[in-house]
Amino acid sequence: LNDDMAEARAALQKFFGFTDFKPGQADVLEAAFAGENILAVMPTGSGKSLCYQLPAIIRPGLTIVVSPLIALMRDQVQQLRERGVGAAALNSVNSASDNALIEAGLRKGRYRLVYVAPERLVRGDTQALLREAGANVLAIDEAHCVSQWGHDFRPEYSDLAQVAKSIGDMQLIAVTATADAPTRDDIVQKLFPAKPRVFVRSFDRPNIHLAMQRKANVTHQIETMIARHKGQSGIVYCASRKGVEKLSETLSAKGVAALPYHAGLASEIRSAHQDEFLRCDGVVIVATIAFGMGIDKPNVRFVCHADLPQSIEAYYQEIGRAGRDGLPSDTLTLFGEADVRLRERQISESDSPPERKRLERRKLNGLLALCETPRCRRQTLLAAFGEASEPCGNCDVCEGKWPFFNGVVAAQKVMSAIHRTSGR
Ligand code: ADP
Ligand code: MG
Ligand code: ZN
């Protein structure tokens, strides 16, 4: 085991150019080398990919990686190849001849890792091929997709336990950033034949400043935030495509280097804007939630929500794109009654089963509680992820900047306003 860890360290250096493990990685790697089945819940940016990539590189056999997005798989494969690690992706966007080449490569044992789209993995012929290629580990990235309780359930993920069994005797390494306690339990139950080793790393990102405001003049509120971060890179999330276009136009007209990003834009435009954001500093990307998964820009200095996010998990994930380099970073989330009504309506009108709707309401309420809390925001946020903590000193509530919004205070204000007017 010590040898394995030494070898992992050497490979970390040789292939990735890093000298040390990030917090949490070593524990997961040790369990991986001990052959255990693993569920690792670690925050975004904590380096979960290496938890399955390093074992894949230094141990015999082939590691299958499942990930929900083809774009993410392509990124990872490309990065691994650039670093000299044999990796390939089997998916529906490859040409038939690409896939044939990869299949031949698999039979010849050319790869340490093969990334497979879930819908491809359920096919019997794919399973037979992977068995023949010596697959012995199934790594499941974004494992919360297995759970109906997670915020991004993918039906294709439901079959993974069965797939692992039918390919053969596979070690399972599941990783995710977003799983509250009920989601974790559900993943354990859906994915693993027996209780796995579960690792949960602190979700705290102390360098990210948290702040929330009621919507007043949204453009002005967002502009003020951007002005505080002149020349720095940031993301502004809007709930709708129309909102994105309007806000990015308004900001551009005021001289901000703002670029829109949403799924309705042509893909060339989307990737041009994304590239510019990644390449240059000082670009503000105005986007729907279509933007961000798999984006790895270390020096995003601020994240704004011009509209309320969909859930407390979505909030956490989106603000988490700020400050991956560990330097001070700023966030501002705006919310208003209309956001809440819209989200309520989306939930009611969706064709999800009632149980699911109840859950979505609970996640929305978790977020509203965070909006209106008179307690430290970080304490409230971490509590939602099952973590106890002290007041942080790095949020608007701790700084005394939050005009407590709760029913009592609001009612008192209204009453005193009435008294003032009637007294005159
Ligand atoms: P996650 O999936 O947990 O969000 P990633 O696996 O995408 O995180 O890794 C996030 C970033 O951290 C990547 O740029 C990766 O190269 C880097 N990284 C991973 N492990 C280390 C390490 N031990 N030292 C330094 N950087 C690391
Ligand atoms: Mg990841
Ligand atoms: Zn605080």
Image (cartoon, rainbow, N blue to C red):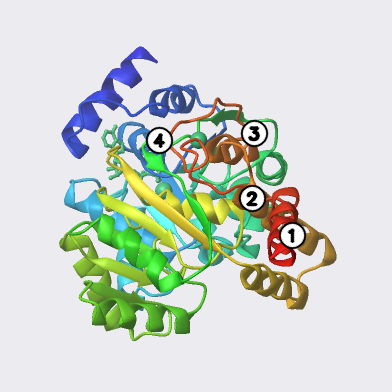
Q: What residue type is labelled 3?
A: Gly
Q: Residue at x 47, y 34 (%)?
A: 204
Quarter of the picture containing the C terminus is bottom right
Place of residue 141 in the rendered image (x, y in percent of width and height, measured from the top left): 48, 49
Mark nearer the N terminus (4 vs 1): 4
Which residue does the numbered mark 3 point to in the structure image? 386
Q: Which residue is drawn at 64% across and 42% down?
A: 180
Which residue does the numbered mark 2 point to in the structure image? 372
Q: Does the residue labelled 4 lie within 8 Å of ligand 1?
A: yes
Figure check: 14 above or below 423: above
Disc 1 and disc 2: Cα gap in Å? 26 Å
Mark nearer the N terminus (2 vs 3): 2
Which residue does the numbered mark 4 point to in the structure image? 51
Quadrant for residue 4, please give it: top left
Mark nearer the N terminus (1 vs 2): 2
Q: Which amino acid does label 2 sit on?
A: Glu
Figure check: 422 above or below 131: below
Disc 1 and disc 3: Cα gap in Å? 44 Å
Figure check: 236 above or below 23: below
Say what secondary structure mark 2 lies in: helix
Disc 4 and disc 1: Cα gap in Å? 63 Å
Place of residue 233 in the rendered image (x, y in percent of width and height, measured from the top left): 24, 58
Q: Are marks 1 and 2 in contact (CB under 8 Å)?
A: no
Q: Which amino acid does label 4 sit on?
A: Cys
Which residue does the numbered mark 1 point to in the structure image? 419
Disc 2 and disc 4: Cα gap in Å? 37 Å
Quadrant for residue 124, please give it: bottom right
Neighbour class for label 1 at 10 Å: few (<14), some, many (≥20)?
Answer: few
